[in-house]
Amino acid sequence: MGEVVEPIKRFRGANAAPSDFKSPPPPPPTQHIAFDRHELREILNVYGRLVASGEMRDYAIDMLKEKAVFSLFRRMGEVPTYRVEKDPKLRNRQGAYAVITATGLILKRGHDLARVLSVLDKRLKLVTN
């Protein structure tokens, strides 16, 4: 008995070379807004003083497409007590940096991060009479 065997066909075509079929290009990387080294240093300095005074215990950093957020927590597992946000879209208006409370109240907004963070920084000041 003669069995009929079908010839094997190549999926890509019989005459195509392997170099003719290239994989699709990878998708473009998504751009996220982030804090640079100097901004993080300023934020972490203030955060360190708040930890030393016992006011804060934890933090989180979120890098989103629209803005970067540094959240400060009084206790782990709660909503952030304060958020330091960097929103480049507001750079030419009120300023890219803002300190926001848990209720959404904007404490300070501006172009200079150190000046905006001064709302959180409770350093001892010399008082003279």
Image (spheres, rainbow, N blue to C red):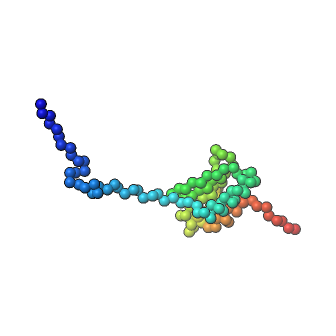
Residue 3: percent from left, percent from top: 14, 34
Quick one: which residue is furthest to the right in this view?
129
Residue at 55%, 64% in the rendered image: 88
Quick one: which residue is furthest to the left in this view?
1
Say which quadrant the C terminus sits in.
bottom right
Say which quadrant the N terminus sits in.
top left
| Residue 55 relative to residue 23: left or right | right
Residue 71 seen from this side: yes
Q: How many marks?
A: 0
| Residue 10 relative to residue 108: left or right | left
Residue at 69%, 59% in the rendered image: 46
Residue 91: percent from left, percent from top: 56, 66
Residue at 16%, 38% in the rendered image: 5
Quick one: which residue is furthest to the front in this view?
1
Residue 32: percent from left, percent from top: 51, 58
Q: Nearer the viewer, residue 83 or 13?
A: 13
Place residue 48 in its image quadrant: bottom right
Residue 4: percent from left, percent from top: 14, 36
Q: Is residue 23 above or below residue 114?
A: above
Residue at 56%, 69% in the rendered image: 92
